[in-house]
Image: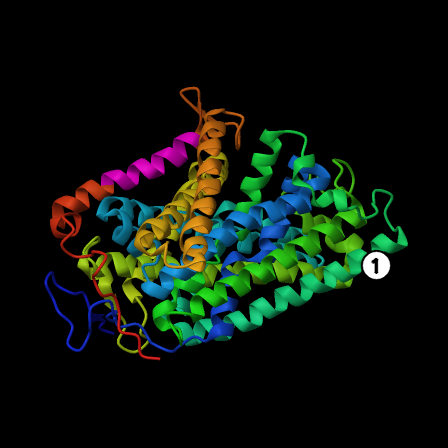
Amino acid sequence: MTQLDVRPQVGDTVSGVAEGDVRGKGLGKGSVGLVGSAVIGISTVAPVYCLTSTLGSTAGEVGLQMPAVFLAGFLPMLLVAFAYRELNKAVPDCGTSFTWTVKAFGPRVGWMCGWGLVIATIIVLSNLAGVATSYFWLLAGEITNNPSISALDDNKLVHIATCLTLIAAATAISYRGMTATKGVQYALVGLQLAVLGLFVAMAFQKASAGSFDTGLDFSWQWMNPFAVESMAAFTAGLSLSIFMYWGWDACLATNEETTGSAKTPGRASLIAMVVLVGSYLATGIAAQMAVGSGASGLGLGNPETSDNVFAALAGPVMGPLLGILLFVAVLASATASLQTTFIPVARTVLAMSTYEALPSSYAKVHPRFKTPGRATVMAGVATGVFYTVMTLVSENVLTDTIFALGLMICFYYSLTAFACAWYFRGELRRSARDLFFKGVFPVLGGLLLATVFFKTLIDMWNPSYGSGSTVLGVGSVFVIGVGLLALGLVIMFVTERRSPAFFRGQVLTKSTPALVVED
């Protein structure tokens, strides 16, 4: 089917749109409400997937202070969420970080911020597809009680083929619009949260019964981040914790399709954040009380099981039958996030193309589904190619690419936080609320994430960071992380030659209207 090109031209005016209003890109308005937006934010984060992949690693880094580090990671995200909320009220544009940083700092900084979001999302999509594939075959083997079926995941051709199938299915659902997305997400998010609640309840029951020798009594000292043994350990744990919250901003990427575009997405993001921090704290405390955080046996810090904690705890905590539900929940979590994570990247690309920062072909929306169809397909193809190439080249390269993800997350979140304070700098003296929510809180969040960014950059130089691979004596995680940012600079300079108007500041400025809000 044909798609509708809504790309504006330089100097276009919008009939009936006053200065400061916003203009449409062709997306389906009113497709998502408050609950649906919050569900999309929770789904994109994928709490069950995040917990099974980072709960053990965090405990291995900070020991019993793991719950405290979860809270510490929540703080900068909450502060940045305030920045997103305030910016969305003023400019409810689906380009979110890209659009806002262009308006605050100019086209080049904004373009790189958009690039950081896009490349981070492609990395996450490939990782989610890989995890969903592995759990698909693991679950199939558990249900059939046939280890040979589970072993199919070790066959690269079978693994890649399954992974590409899942990516194609997720792309197709996202392509068909927000209505199709919501229907799938309500079921998948509801399932994973219900199973996670069951796991927490049963873990508390096991802890009270003293079922495991490594179990511990709860202590308020677990909530003290200053009890972490070293700054290096705290930073490593904090980096993992920040990753566990990444993705809540998908609520904002659907702002042009949400009822109450100026306020609903911001409220939904805060609801998603509260649900996430509550889930993480409850699960972390329950698991630590049940099995402890030691490095042996069922202890959360056991390096042999830390990369997939729920696979080790499912049977002992929930029993053989209910334990299968935990495998289902991880698969549902990864699959749900795989589908919703297409939302922010496709809409960021749509906005970048609309404002002439990318080729015009990506500014087309489907006339029936009201989605950025071409941008969505592009994201799916890029994810499939990226994962296939990385898997065939080296498992170490794929692992190190995922480790480099934290650099991208801190990069574009901190830029967005600083953009909020600079964009509203003329309003900070109007009231105490404006000062704190538009200035102080965003700057603090940005500084915290920028600190993690530079500390991670330094740590990445060491070859021991990540898989241990090196490139000319430099850690491969550093090479990949910095290399991806440098690639963005190259693409930006090439784009500037083809679309000079955007980079001269003639297309998107602080006063440029973005979309028409009709609630």
Q: Dividing the image into 4 quarters, which one contains the C terminus?
A: bottom left
Q: Secondary structure at mark 1?
A: helix
Side of 123 where 43 appears, left or right: right
Residue 256 part of the magenta segment: no
**Secondary structure, magenta segment, majority class:** helix
Farthest residue to the left: give it.
Answer: 11
| Residue at the image position 18 percent from the left and 59 percent from the top | 360
**Left/right of residue 234 with respect to residue 437 in the rendered view:** right
At x 20% / y 72%, what residue is drawn? 18
Give left or right: position of 40 versus 518: right
User: Can I make out residue 425 in this image?
Assistant: yes
**Coordinates of residue 249 in the picture (x, y in percent):** 44, 58
Q: Which stretch is magenta? A: 478-490
Query: Magenta segment: does it hold 482?
Result: yes
In the rendered image, residue 49, in percent from the top left (x then y), is placed at: 59, 54
Q: Vertical placement of 453 versus 207: above or below?
A: above
- Identify residue type, mark 1: Gln
